[in-house]
Amino acid sequence: MTAYFGLDIGSSSIKAVQTTMMGAKTFGVNSVGLVVNPAGSVDFSNPIVSDKLKVSLKQLLADLKIKDKRVVVSISESKVFSRILTMPSMSEAELASAIKWEAEQFVPIPVSEVELDFSILQPSIPGEDKKMLVYLVAAPKKYLQAMVDFLTSVGLEPIAIESEMVAVSRALTFGDTGATTLILHMGAMSSVLAIVDTNALTFSYVVESGGVALTRALAQSLALPLPQAEEYKRTYGLDENQLEGKVRSGLLIVLDTIVSEMRKAMEYHLTTRKSHVSRIVLSGGGAYLPSLGSHLSGVFGGIEVIVADSFAKGKVNKGAVIPREKAVYSVATGLSQRIF
Ligand SMILES: Nc1ncnc2c1ncn2[C@@H]1O[C@H](COP(=O)(O)OP(=O)(O)OP(=O)(O)O)[C@@H](O)[C@H]1O
Ligand SMILES: [Mg+2]
């Protein structure tokens, strides 16, 4: 198969990563970069948005000298309906027809209006008799079509569309030894929680608030204009010694909701899988919120908290420069690492 790259169109920025897989332990990094999303939206069906995105995306590909047309692209977790299901062991063909019935249980729109996809996370669940773990995702056909039309209009050929969750967990478990990890991927509009146990995604959940909600909460509580609230968030974050802890308190209004979902996720994991989450990996732009790591470590009894580096196992090829804020690229790296 000819080369392809990973493209993550976020509401804050568009990221592209191109890699060459070199077995299960390492890969080559050829290009990495981002451009600000001038529309602040990923609504491809809106011509004003898609025109702005088009200009920026072309600029990014030109800057990175990416000439490939084939692309693996992400779909925002907040645009899809997904579930991790425990199902009786069966063949892929049987599963393909069984998932339709499963989807009807949780997809709030008619199943005829969504595209269904699945991946087998664990062919046999340890300690459970003849059961498998399956990730099921349903994406609205309308949204998918608008996205494909957009990519085609830029001269690209989408060869796969994946949810953020799948891409992030692939990138952050690449070549790993398998500590039970909770990933918090905090973007601008949403935050994705995932638990990865012995390299399989075992839990996923989306919180419909991210960096933008944090900034809004801060703007409101301190009566600040949004750009200034954004600056305060990035400069002071959760540091209690700054501005008498007022920035921290403003941010915690939103962050507490995310933290309580993290707690529920860990408890669920302990009950169902009988194992403790042993570390937290922070991903997305929100990973750089000052003092977030120490805050979470404090909340969760001293747990290890690290910032994601999807390039850690990569060999950087000539011409590629790894940016400082690596955690922003987890989705794009994971997409580029998909094997067909
Ligand atoms: N130093 C920082 N401290 C706090 N937040 C930050 C920092 N740097 C970036 N962010 C936040 O990260 C968010 C952007 O992250 P990211 O690039 O992962 O989002 P996105 O992928 O474009 O959005 P989405 O996937 O939700 O559409 C913004 O809300 C921004 O405020
Ligand atoms: Mg994103």
Image (cartoon, rainbow, N blue to C red):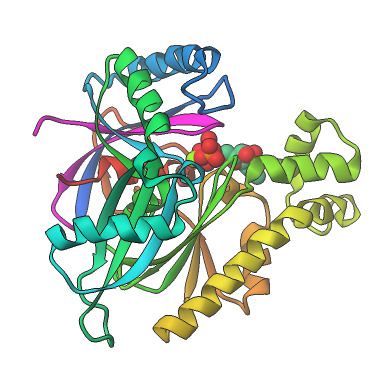
Q: Residue furthest left?
A: 1
Residue 87, magenta (yes or no):
no
Reply above or below: 207 against 43.
Answer: below
Point out the stretch of residues depicted in magenta: 1-24
Q: Residue at position x 44%, y 50% from top?
A: 81
Q: Where the N terminus falls, by quadrant?
A: top left
Give how far across and how far down residue 303 sits, in percent: 56, 75
Reply above or below: 121 against 186.
Answer: below
Q: Where the C terminus falls, by quadrant?
A: top left
Q: Residue at position x 70%, y 57% from top?
A: 255
Q: Can residue 16 be seen in this view?
A: yes
Give how far across and how far down residue 276 sits, in percent: 47, 82
| Quadrant in which residue 213 is drawn | top right
Give how far across and how far down residue 165 sits, in percent: 41, 52
Q: Residue at position x 44%, y 36% from top?
A: 323
Reply above or below: 45 against 205.
Answer: above
